[in-house]
Image (tube, rainbow, N blue to C red):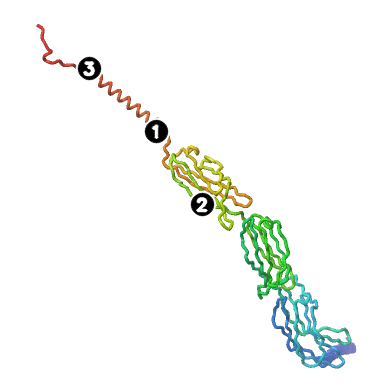
Amino acid sequence: MSFYKLFKKHNVKRKKTFFIALCLFLSIMVSGQFSKALICQVIYLRTDKDFYYADEVIEIEASWDFDYVEDDDPYFQIRIYDELDSLLWNSSEFDGKGVFEENWTIIIRNLNLNFNYYSNIISIKAVYFNEFNGGDMELIILEALYLTIFKRNLACELFNFTEKVILGKNLSFNAHFYSDNTNSNLSGHDINFYILSNNSMIYQKTYTSNDYGIISLYLSSINDMRLGINKLIFNVSNGIIYNRTVFYYEIVVEKTPIYIDILKYNNKFRGSEQIELELFFYYFNESIVPLRNEPIRVMIYDNLGIKYQKIFNIDTFGFLKINISSPIYEINQEDYRFYLQLVYNGSKLLNYKILVLNFEMLTVSLPNYNSLISLLVILMGSVFIIIVIANYIYHYKKKKPRFKKVNEIFFKF
């Protein structure tokens, strides 16, 4: 390669290097001029807490230093964004020069947050706007804080509530709803109430809580509930402040129970004796009420099956007297154990009742055919032996030689 070409190539490289250095110098100069032209820095940006509930307010404090040349038109601002970076709130535009301090009180429920969820995250940003080189207004973020907004949890407390109710009775109770964080009452809020029985909705009504967060309920065990387990559900509708909450309770509806007092009962007797029982049937309705003129099924059974059954009737005073003789129920063993069962089938409002009593029959004297045959054999053998002995004695005496007296002997010559 010639010297001229080498010199030309080297000269081109020097021009490129000089051009790059010139561009770098100019950019530094422009940056320096801009720094001299605009000064905006945050001294502090803070809130009173890191997390809040939806019914609270956010206290924001900020301080900043702002300076710029007269030809610019920038301004400082505080802005609040949601999780999707959508603008929820912004302060006034501050374009004054110098050091400033400001504070704001933000009502959270006015931020138009999406309260379909239990919590929301918001960001508080200190920003400034300015036009660069005559272009569009550009936003510069100086500092940001991130806060969590929660809905409050609710609590429910029942008063005069019982988990069991007798069929035919009415139930009156109160439900109190309040925030478990502050104990403040849930006032003026709609509460949906349901009753489910066997997975079927049998009652539905919407109540509105009063100033004390209370709703009053009056339920009929016949019209509003069903016999057995009833599930009570309080559903607090979703709102801005409170989280969607469902409260579950259960009520068991039962028929009126029947009671039996045993007045006379002897569980041990002999076979010639009778089963004698005397009982008193009753139930409670604020006082003792006798069970009147109701049928009672009586059954006697052992491990082999039913021996006896019959329907008896309670008298008008609630008493039942039973007398059963032993031959009726076919007892055929000694020291025999058996059972007597009394059954009341109940009614629309009265529950069924079963009472089982055990009995023991002692030393039952009943014929035993094997022993009788043995006795007859022994008797016949004894008679036969006596006859044989008597016959032997008789013949022995008959064959024995007879001796005469001396005076009866004479000789013949």
Q: Is residue 265 found left or right of 255 in the rendered image?
A: left
Which quarter of the image is occupied by the N terminus? Answer: bottom right
How packed mark 1 is, by other alpha carbons closer than 10 Å (few <14, some 14-19, many 20 or more), is few
* Residue 126, percent from left and from top: 77, 84
The residue sitting at 44% across, 45% down in the picture is: 268
Seen as rendered, the residue at the extreme front is 316
* Residue 379, percent from left and from top: 35, 28
Which quarter of the image is occupied by the C terminus? Answer: top left
Residue beneath disc 2: 261
- Which amino acid type corresponds to the residue marked 3 in the rendered image? Lys
The residue sitting at 43% across, 36% down in the picture is: 366
Residue beneath disc 1: 371
* Residue 33, percent from left and from top: 83, 92
Which secondary structure lies at badge 3?
A: helix
How packed mark 3 is, by other alpha carbons closer than 10 Å (few <14, some 14-19, many 20 or more), is few
Gap in Å between the C-alphas at discs 2 and 3? 85 Å
* Residue 185, percent from left and from top: 68, 73
| Vertical relation: 97 (above or below) 166 | below
Observer-nearest residue: 116 or 288? 288
The residue sitting at 11% across, 14% down in the picture is: 407
Q: Earlier in the sequence, mark 3 or mark 1?
A: 1
- Which amino acid type corresponds to the residue marked 2 in the rendered image? Asp
Q: Earlier in the sequence, mark 2 or mark 3?
A: 2
Specify the quadrant of the image occupied by residue 35: bottom right
Which secondary structure lies at badge 1?
A: helix
- Which amino acid type corresponds to the residue marked 1 in the rendered image? Ser
Q: Which mark is residue 17?
A: none
Gap in Å between the C-alphas at discs 1 and 2? 45 Å
Residue beneath disc 3: 399
Which secondary structure lies at badge 2?
A: strand
Asked if the residue under mark 3 is in contact with the one under mark 2, i.e. CB atoms within 8 Å, the reply is no
